[in-house]
């Protein structure tokens, strides 16, 4: 998501960075391009109009005109206004420590609501909560089965009763949770293909009975402005406290993410960035603005690395690199940890300057699978000492991994180059450490 709009912004900024000063003429031209980029991204036209007015007023201010780098100042203004457009800053969720907390999820059918409930359960379990999923969608066929399957895969309990009404299920589930000391109840409600009176009546009953601490509206980011319009209708009927945007890893234009806060007045709380259960992230407006403008998102990248990369393994790996005993087994382990962090294209987009260059470039995600297959087709001895792999061994490995001998050769060559680079970097780091130690010893 946002590849097209990021590319457009990068082109606009490139033009402005080359000018000596900002004038009404070049600002007006840039703003026309910004307006076109936002409208093509399916951003609400009223939101675009206000955004344009705010940026233009600041861009023509005395501070920017007097700036040595007016182009950079313009980028800064756009970044600040985009951040403000999406809510300003991440909203931290505060829950009670001494009672059962309740989250109610609502939305249209097909928005990814049931999956979002399961993702929330895993997210809050990592925060130290004991979650309980409650199946109150008795209308959609297999909705309860889906939630039970998701709960089982995550080892999260699911409260369900196929014989009772949603209101009774919710009431019984809350009583059970309070008796059992469960700290977080997540209620999955029924969705419809369109908003109707019965649906809203049921939601209002559930909300009144559950008295939720948080009510999340789950919207499919792929539907663009439709998601925003539906959110307005829901918010009019039942006040919700936050939005969960699903399918943010898709190829949607991003208009929903840029419009929904301004139109509804409700912050985006979480975004779904993949199909896996752990692919749910707290929404940070300033980080998203940086990614849209091609500035990357190093903070999120580091956070993902901290979650997925084992610190103890990292220390052992550092020792192996220093001793030059880094093997293909170690390489395979690192590869698998990187895969857990998400698609390569997503990770690269978080590196400043790389996102814009990747626009239009399709990464072959099967390349990692091929590397894994090649290494797994080797014997333990071959992984430990790749230099023993001769022609016959290469043919055996290629047949076992479904690859060619050339691909095996390429991997071995790349691994050898990587080991050489690591050895050099380790020596440089070691010399710097020695120099720092000597400086500390000097009076």
Image: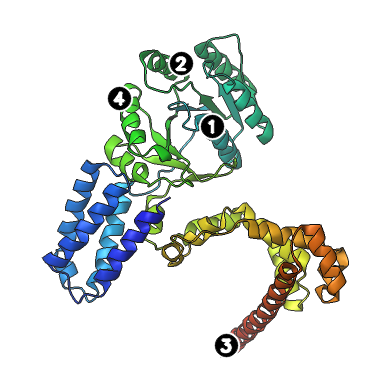
Q: Which mark is residue 439?
A: 3
Residue under numbered circle 1: 117
Q: Quadrant of the C terminus?
A: bottom right
Q: Which mark is residue 236?
A: 4
Residue at left offset 68%, top offset 78%: 417
Label 1 to label 3: alpha-carbon separation: 55 Å
N-terminal label among 2 and 1: 1
N-terminal label among 3 and 4: 4
Q: Which of 124 and 231 is in front in this view?
A: 231
Q: Nearer the viewer, residue 419 or 8?
A: 8
The kind of secondary structure element at disc 1 is: helix
Residue at left offset 60%, top offset 9%: 163
N-terminal label among 1 and 4: 1
Q: Could you tell me residue 368's position as x and y percent?
A: 66, 59
Instruction: Give the foreground label among 2 and 1.
Output: 1
Instruction: Give the foreground label among 1 and 3.
Output: 1
Q: Do the residues labelled 1 and 4 touch (CB within 8 Å)?
A: no
The kind of secondary structure element at disc 2 is: helix
Please, which colouring scheme is shown?
rainbow
The relative height of residue 256 versus residue 358 in the rendered view (above or below) is: above
Q: Could you tell me residue 384's position as x and y percent?
A: 83, 69
Q: Could you tell me residue 5's position as x and y percent?
A: 35, 55
Label 2 to label 1: alpha-carbon separation: 19 Å
Asked whether residue 381 appears in the rendered view, the answer is yes
In the rendered structure, the answer to whether residue 320 lies left or right of residue 108 reads right
The relative height of residue 180 versus residue 305 in the rendered view (above or below) is: above
The relative height of residue 26 versus residue 233 in the rendered view (above or below) is: below
Residue under numbered circle 2: 209
């Amino acid at each position: 998501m946002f590849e097209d709009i990021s590319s457009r912004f990068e082109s606009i900024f490139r033009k402005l960075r080359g000018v000596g000063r900002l004038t009404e003429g070049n600002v007006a031209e840039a703003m026309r391009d910004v307006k076109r980029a936002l409208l093509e991204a399916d951003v609400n036209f009223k939101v675009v109009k206000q955004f344009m007015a705010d940026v233009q007023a600041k861009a023509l201010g005395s501070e920017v005109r007097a700036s040595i780098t007016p182009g950079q100042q313009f980028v800064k203004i756009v970044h600040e206004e985009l951040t403000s457009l999406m809510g300003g800053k991440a909203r931290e969720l505060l829950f009670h420590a001494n009672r059962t907390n309740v989250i109610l999820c609502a939305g249209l059918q097909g928005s990814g609501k049931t999956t979002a409930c399961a993702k929330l359960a895993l997210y809050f379990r990592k925060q130290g909560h004991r979650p309980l999923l409650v199946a109150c969608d008795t209308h959609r066929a297999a909705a309860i089965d889906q939630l039970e399957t998701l709960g089982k895969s995550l080892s999260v309990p699911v409260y369900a009763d196929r014989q009772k009404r949603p209101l009774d299920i919710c009431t019984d589930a809350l009583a059970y949770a309070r008796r059992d000391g469960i700290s977080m109840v997540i209620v999955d409600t029924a969705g419809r293909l369109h908003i109707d009176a019965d649906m809203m009546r049921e939601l209002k009953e559930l909300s009144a009975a559950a008295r939720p601490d948080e009510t999340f509206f789950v919207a499919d980011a792929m539907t663009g402005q439709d998601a925003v319009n539906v959110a307005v209708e829901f918010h009019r009927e039942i006040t919700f406290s936050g939005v969960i945007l699903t399918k943010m890893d898709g190829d949607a234009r991003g208009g929903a993410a840029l419009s929904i806060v301004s139109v509804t007045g409700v912050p985006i709380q979480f975004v779904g960035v993949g199909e896996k259960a752990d692919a749910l992230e707290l929404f940070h407006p300033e980080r998203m603005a940086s990614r849209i403008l091609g500035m990357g998102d190093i903070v999120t990248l580091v956070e993902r690395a901290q979650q997925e990369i084992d610190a103890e393994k990292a220390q052992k790996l550092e020792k192996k690199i220093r001793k030059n005993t880094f093997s293909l087994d170690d390489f395979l382990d690192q590869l698998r940890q990187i895969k857990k962090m998400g698609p390569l294209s997503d990770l690269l987009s978080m590196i400043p300057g790389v996102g814009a260059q990747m626009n239009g470039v399709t990464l072959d995600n099967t390349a990692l699978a091929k590397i894994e297959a090649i290494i797994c087709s080797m014997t333990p001895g071959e992984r430990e000492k790749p230099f023993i792999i001769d022609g016959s061994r290469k043919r055996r490995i290629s047949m076992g991994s479904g690859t060619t001998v050339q691909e095996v050769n390429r991997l071995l060559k790349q691994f050898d180059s990587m080991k050489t680079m690591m050895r050099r970097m380790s020596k440089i780091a070691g010399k710097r450490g020695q120099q720092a130690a000597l400086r500390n010893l000097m009076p």
